[in-house]
Image (tube, helix red, strand yellow):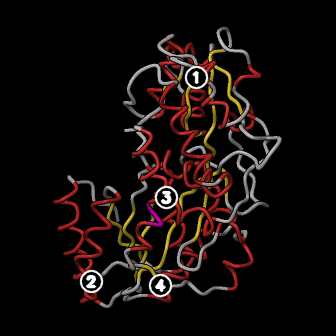
Amino acid sequence: MTITQRPTTRLLAGALLFAAAAAAHAQPVVNVYSARHYQTDEALYAEFTKETGIKINRIEGKEDELLERIKNEGASSPADVFITVDASRLTMADQAGVFQPAQSKLLEARIPAHLRTPNWIAFSTRARVIVYNKTRVNPEWVQTYEDLANPRLKGQLCVRSGSHPYNLSLGAALLTHDGEAKTEAWAKGVVANFARAPKGGDTDQLKAVAAGECTVAVANSYYVARLMRSKKPEDLRAMESLTVVWPNQKSWGTHVNVSGAGVLKNAPNKANAIRFMEYLASDPAQVYFADGNNEWPAVKSVAVKNPALEQLGPFKADELPLEKWSPNIAAAQQLFDRAGWR
């Protein structure tokens, strides 16, 4: 079931439903706290219940709100699984000690090793891409993330806040690949190239490039795909002037981030939680989970028929293991702060 009230009311109502379900003992359940809000997830959850007979009690909310609730509930928490987006948020939850290992041979077999950590697992992927105005930028100037710091782009770059998880994850990956000194110099170069102070989301950066406010931006791939699949004429017009680059194709590959989940430390229905996690790795669930946000499945053998992603074409993805770069997110924030990327 989905609770659709405002977040605070939604959480309170969800807690009451969980208590009622536990008291009834009428049906096996799994209690999911989810920061994903996609229409296709409805079909995903319904199919899980149909296949297993396990009822999903779901609470949706903002990532920080849900994590704080899990911590406050402690050992009495009814939550079994926490689902959220971006490795930085999953790492934050892991560092808060809310997860436990989801030991499963099926998950180990289905999810590539670089998309798993001991305590949480990725179920879909998205890329951090460079987008530029095709009439105003030499394509050779924007082929790598490192190029964004080149002085020839001075006053031309639009990007969102340096404290946003999407940029922190990219910074953490760069730290792991290039080291602290080189990455800090890069961040300072990026700041020097700002066309304006960081503001808005990734879609705002894309539209700013199309409008001529800047010539280059950084965005997650699914924001590009959303505009490509939009039915709004203004969105389609915006895309006509933009070109997408898969960065670092001649080196370590394009930075890839994730949506993922973990079994919670105090899960009252651990067996059902692991079964739900295994279901998310199944072929049909991978399609639902990924295509709901114009992403790619984590399971390599699963294909998604998404016209926008097909049009963007194949690319070399960075396969640096999540557990190697995600711990550097806090260091990336400190580095961005020193560079003045607010």
What amino acid type should be assigned to the residue bearing mark 2? Gly
Left or right for 246, reference 322: right
At a point 46% along the width and 49% down the height, the residue shown is 335
**Percent coordinates x, y for residue 161 in the rendering:** 40, 38
Determine which residue is flagged by label 3. 329
Q: CA distance from mark 2 to mark 1?
A: 45 Å
Disc 1 versus disc 3: nearer the observer: 3
Q: Residue beneath label 1, please?
A: 216
In this picture, is 23 found above or below 239?
below
> Is residue 18 left or right of 156 when viewed as pictured?
left
Q: Please, what is the three-letter code of the amino acid marked with disc 1? A: Val
Magenta span: chief secondary structure: helix
Crowdedness near tag 2: few (<14), some (14–19) or many (≥20) residues, C-alpha within 10 Å: few
Q: Nearer the viewer, residue 143 or 26?
A: 143
In primary-sequence order, the first of circles 2 and 3 is: 2
Sequence-wise, which precedes: disc 4 or disc 3? Answer: 4
**Residue 189, disc:** none
| 45 sits left or right of 298 in the view | left
Element type at mark 1: strand
> Which region of the structure is painted magenta?
86-91
Give SS at disc 3: helix
Q: Upstream in the sequence, badge 2 or badge 1?
A: 2
